[in-house]
């Protein structure tokens, strides 16, 4: 099993806000998206680009994964953002408004031409109706490019669908399921969209639990107060981790060699449950290691 990195909480930080970028060094978020797009006014775009690239180069964010969200390549800032971010060497670049596999191929080539190392990952926003229709084509590019993850752009999807927000997100369920299927089919990460009502902690928790149940790897966030509840919700429950360890031990017992089905703590358990158990324990151990780093 490949190494697992916790990405429960993926917090957007406005690239134009120097104070926020500094505060991010102390927050318990697993990942930080340093945003040059939606969170930055047009007149502040160039200054924000310089600031974000500077702080990425300077470091000081400890175990937090750093992702730079650039502006679209159809804007006056997009190409310069891409080149500057490639030179700054974050963990990943997040590109907005992709709609096809050709977009992924172009971004991958542009990053390489800008001098990006092979370790620089590409994440993309899934936030347009056309992207939903082309999910398989987009996700398949993960096999031949640096594409590593999807981030759902829920607000943009609702806008383009001409839909109204719903508390249970019933009108996004099909979209989310298709995106998760595409991500899993091609071994990509996928993150839930943001919860806009910062003051509604109960609503946020319900949405985060729903996202975990859907199968998202984590959730994108817009405020530091959302980080700790998100981390808790996306962490494997203690009793489930214990059961997983017992499942692993049971299948490792020489007395059970060759058996495909066992009863573990009264539960019928198959080999598919063993694979799930190994992943859950690996996730729990990765989270413990991450939290030990502060």
Image (cartoon, rainbow, N blue to C red):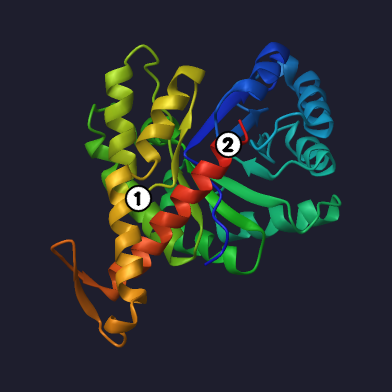
Measured as percent of width and height from the top left, residue 286 is found at: 52, 48
Quarter-of-image position of residue 245: bottom left
Say what secondary structure mark 1 lies in.
loop
Residue 73 or residue 291, whichever sits in front: 291
Tell me if I can see residue 131 in this picture: no
Locate the C terminus by quadrant.
top right
Q: Does residue 198 sit above or below 32 in this rendering?
A: above
* Residue at (32, 58) in percent of width and height: 244
Measured as percent of width and height from the top left, residue 181 is found at: 37, 59
Query: Mark 2 or mark 1: which comes first in sequence?
Result: 1
| Residue at which label 1 appears | 215
Residue 250 or residue 37, whichever sits in front: 250
CA gap, disc 2 and disc 1: 26 Å
Mark number displayed over residue 292: 2
Measured as percent of width and height from the top left, residue 113 is found at: 84, 55
Question: Badge 1, how many Cα within 10 Å: few under 14, some, many 20+?
Answer: some
Task: Please name which of the two marks, 2 or 1, marks the residue nearer to the observer.
Answer: 2
Quarter-of-image position of residue 135: bottom left
Quarter-of-image position of residue 280: bottom left
Residue 9 or residue 193, whichever sits in front: 9
* Residue at (58, 64) in percent of width and height: 141
Residue reaching furthest bottom?
Answer: 258
């Amino acid at each position: 099993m490949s190494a697992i990195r916790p990405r429960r909480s993926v917090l957007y930080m406005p690239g134009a806000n120097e104070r926020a970028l500094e505060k991010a060094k102390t927050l318990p978020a697993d990942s930080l998206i340093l945003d040059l797009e939606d969170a930055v006014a047009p007149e502040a775009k160039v200054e924000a680009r310089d600031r974000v690239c500077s702080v990425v180069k300077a470091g000081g964010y400890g175990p937090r994964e750093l992702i730079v969200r650039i502006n679209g390549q159809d804007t006056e800032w997009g190409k310069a953002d891409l080149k500057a971010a490639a030179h700054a060497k974050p963990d990943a670049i997040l590109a907005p408004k992709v709609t096809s596999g050709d977009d992924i191929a172009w971004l991958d080539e542009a990053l390489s031409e800008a001098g990006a190392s092979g370790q620089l990952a590409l994440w993309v926003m899934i936030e347009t109706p056309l992207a939903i229709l082309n999910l398989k084509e987009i996700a398949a590019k993960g096999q031949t490019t640096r594409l590593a993850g999807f981030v759902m752009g829920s607000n943009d999807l609702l806008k383009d669908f001409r839909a109204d927000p719903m508390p249970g997100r019933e009108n996004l369920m099909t979209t989310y399921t298709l995106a998760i299927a595409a991500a899993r089919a091609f071994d990509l990460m996928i993150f839930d969209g943001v919860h806009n009502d910062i003051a509604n902690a109960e609503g946020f928790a319900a949405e985060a639990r729903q996202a975990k149940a859907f199968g998202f790897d984590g959730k994108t966030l817009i405020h530091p107060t959302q980080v700790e509840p998100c981390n808790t919700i996306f962490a494997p429950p203690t009793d489930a981790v214990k059961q997983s360890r017992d499942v692993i031990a049971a299948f490792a017992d020489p007395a059970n060699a060759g058996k495909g089905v066992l009863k573990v703590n009264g539960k019928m358990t198959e080999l598919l449950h063993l694979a799930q158990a190994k992943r859950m324990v690996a996730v729990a151990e990765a989270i413990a290691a991450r939290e030990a780093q502060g």
